[in-house]
Structures are given as C-alpha cells and as structure tokens.
Amino acid sequence: MKVLAYNIKVFVYGTLLRGIHNHDYYLKDSNFVKEDSLPKFEMRTHGSYPGIRPLKWNRAISKVHGEVFEINEETLKRLDQLEGVAPPERVSKDYTGNYTRETVKTESGEEVFVYVKCNCKEQMRMVVRDGRWKTFVQKHRRF
C-alpha cells in the first residue's frame, strides 16, 4: 500500500472552502492549515462559482480571502480535473483550459498553488468586492 505525503499546499477561495459543496468531496481528508488571503487579486463570479485574476495595480479592494490546505499528489490531480486545467500537451495559444494552476505567495508568506481563471475578462461577471465567496453566496443566496 502506497502512503501519500500531504506536502503540497493549495489556496482555495470558492466551492472548495470548508462548508461549501465541493469541500467534502475533494478536501475532506486533507489537512487544513489556516485562513489566509492573496493580495493584488480580484474575484469575479461565473454563475455558481468564482474565478480570480491577478491585478497589475493595487486597488483599495484587491484581496481574495480563502483557506490553505496541505494535500497529496492524488488530490492535486483531482483538483486539476475539477478546475479544468489543460494537460501540457494540449496547451496552446488558443487553448489553456478553464483555469491555470499557479504558484503564488499568500499574505502571510505561504507559497501555495492557486487556480486562476483563464480568459477571466471575457467570461467573468460581477466583481466580489470584499473577496469573500462565502459572504457573496450568503448575500445572493446562490446555494
């Protein structure tokens, strides 16, 4: 039996947060590390889930709040599938998938993977001003 090490850190900000529908299916057995945030990012809605994009300039509200988890390789692969990350052999200038997995530093200095929405400008809708998906969901009664 192969033991998988939980040594990969991922920052989640939407449907993978504790208490929201995808969490139990994908992250139930992963290790919660802490709540954290990503400065200089903006969150937008895309129907029933959010996407984020980095901002090139600092706005008064340019922070995304979320949670950091320690996950294993198997969970990372499952998250890549959920988020529609294109395998390297399929990436082209015309196709990048739904999200890209990028390495960033959180506000507290943790180096983590995060899923960033591709073509965010064209596909995304309303800005989530406070960068908190749970608050947005409660306010707009999306779930």
Image (cartoon, rainbow, N blue to C red):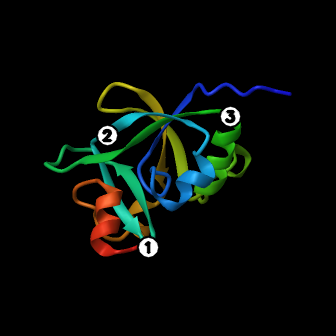
Q: What residue sits 30% from the left and 64% below the top?
A: 136
Quadrant assignment for the C terminus: bottom left
Residue highlighted by disc 1: 47
Label located before the other in sequence (2 or 1): 2
Q: Residue at x 72, y 28 (%)?
A: 4
* Residue at mark 2 to residue at mark 1: CA–CA distance: 22 Å
Q: Which residue is mark 3?
A: 73
Determine whether label 1 and label 3 are within 8 Å by CB: no
Secondary element type, mark 1: loop
The amino acid type, in three-letter code, at marker 3 is Glu
Say what secondary structure mark 2 lies in: strand
How far apart are labels 1 and 3 at the CA level?
29 Å
Viewer-closest of 110 and 33 = 33
Query: From the viewer's perspective, is 47 left or right of 73?
Result: left
| Mark 2, residue position | 37
**As drawn, 27 above or below 2:** below
Question: Is 134 displayed left or right of 88 in the figure?
Answer: left
Label 2: few (<14), some or many (≥20) within 10 Å? many
Tell me the residue at 61%/58% (across/down): 95
- Residue 130, image x, y percentages: 22, 55
Q: Is residue 86 visible?
A: yes
Q: Residues within 10 Å of mark 3 (few under 14, many from 20)?
A: few
Disc 1 marks which amino acid?
Gly
Q: Position of residue 39 (x, y in %)?
A: 27, 39
Query: x, y percentage for residue 97?
Result: 60, 57
Residue 99's label in the rendered image is: none
Residue 91 appears in the figure: no
First of labels 1, 3 by sequence position: 1
